[in-house]
Image (cartoon, rainbow, N blue to C red):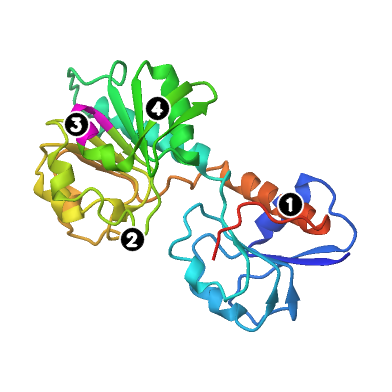
Amino acid sequence: MSLLVTVPTAELAADIAAQSPLPDGVEVLVWDMTEPVPARRLDIVVPSYLGRQHLSVLEGVDVGLVQGQSIGYETVIDRVPAGVPFANAASVHEPATAELALTLTLAAQRELPRFVRAQDAGTWVRGFTSSLADRRVLLVGIGGVGKAVARRLAGFETTITAVAQTARTEQIEGVGEIVVHALADLPALLPDAEIVILSLPGGSATQRLFDAAMLARMADGALLVNVGRGTLVDTDALVAENGRIRAALDVMDPEPLPEGHPLWTAPGVLLTPHVGGAASAMNPRIAALVRTQIDRMLAGEEPVNLIPR
C-alpha cells in the first residue's frame, strides 16, 4: 500500500523519518499549502501550526485525513472541507502547557515579575510572597491539560478540586482519585478557591464563562490562571476588577493583544503570548503522532484523535 503524506516543514519531515524507517510505499512530502496541490490524492495532510487560513486549498482534493498540530480545533474544524476527517493533536501539547500553567502560577504567587524588574534596575528588593503550598486550587477543565496540571500540582502540597461539564470521579496517575464537580457548581466553588486554573476548550458553550458576575465570586486576592482559550474570560470585566483578583494569562481575548490595550498594564496581571505548547516537546511529539496515523492507516485502522464533524 502506498501513502502520500504532506507536512509543512522539512524539520517535521526529518522528525517523522527519525522515528523509525518508513514502510515501503510511504512518501513524506514537504508542502506548506501555499503552492499548488502536489497530487490528486493526499492520504494525510498536516497543515502548519497556525496555518488554518490555507485549508481552503483542499476543496475538491481527495484527502484521507487532515492532522492538526494543536489541541484546540474550534477555529479550524469549519475550514476543513466537508467529508474530510480531521484529527487534533491531543497528546502533543499537554505536558508543555501544564508546565506553563505551573510556571505562571508560581511566578504570580512568588511575584517574580517584581523581582525581575528589580534586577533590571540593579536594585536589591526583598519581600514576603504567597506560597503555592497549602493553597486551595480549583481546576476548571480536567481533560488532557487539566490532568497534566493536576499531576504536576501533586508535589506542591495543594488541595485540588476540579470542575468539568459533567460530575464524576477521575483516577489520575500520581494524584489518585479526585471528585470532579459539574460546571453548574462553579459559582458555589469559586469563593473558596485561592487559585483557579482554566484549561477548558473554546466555543459557544464556554464563551466568557468568567464574566463580571463569575469574576465577582472569586475571593479577594485570588489568582486566575488561563491556559485554555482567551474567550473563556471577559477581558473587559477582568480589567474592571482593577487588581482585586490577580491573573496570569497565556491566552487572552483579543489575540494578539493590541498595543495600548488596558490589559497590558492592569494591576496584578502577568501575560505570556500564547506559548503554552510552543516548547521543545512539540516537534518530536507531533512527529510521533503523525507516524501513529501512518501506521494505523496502513493497517486499515481508524485514526486517533478524530473530531466528530
Magenta segment: does it hold 268? no
| Mark 1 closeness class: few <14, some 14–19, many ≥20 residues within 10 Å | some
Dot 1: what SS?
helix
Callout count: 4
Residue found at x 39% / y 18%: 156
Location of mark 2 (residue): 204
Task: Residue 105: give x, y in percent of width and height.
Answer: 32, 31
Q: Which mark is residue 222?
A: 3
Q: Which mark is residue 291?
A: 1
Dot 3: what SS?
loop
User: Is 59 displayed left or right of 258 in the figure?
Assistant: right
Residue found at x 64% / y 84%: 60
Q: Which mark is residue 17?
A: none
Residue 117 seen anywhere in this rendered image of the structure: no
Instruction: State the separation of the CA atoms marked 2 and 1.
Output: 33 Å
Instruction: State the separation of the CA atoms marked 4 and 2.
Output: 26 Å
Using the rendered view, name the quadrant where residue 126 is placed: top left
N-term mark: 3 or 4: 4
Instruction: State the separation of the CA atoms marked 2 and 3.
Output: 26 Å
Task: Residue 97: give x, y in percent of width and height.
Answer: 45, 41
Please tell me which residue lies in front, 105 or 229: 229
Q: Is residue 1 above or below residue 53?
A: above
Residue range highlighted in magenta:
188-195
Dot 4: what SS?
strand
User: Is 81 displayed left or right of 183 in the figure?
Assistant: right
Q: Are the residues flagged by discs 4 and 1 in contact, CB closer than 8 Å? A: no
Q: Are the residues flagged by discs 3 and 4 in contact, CB closer than 8 Å? A: no
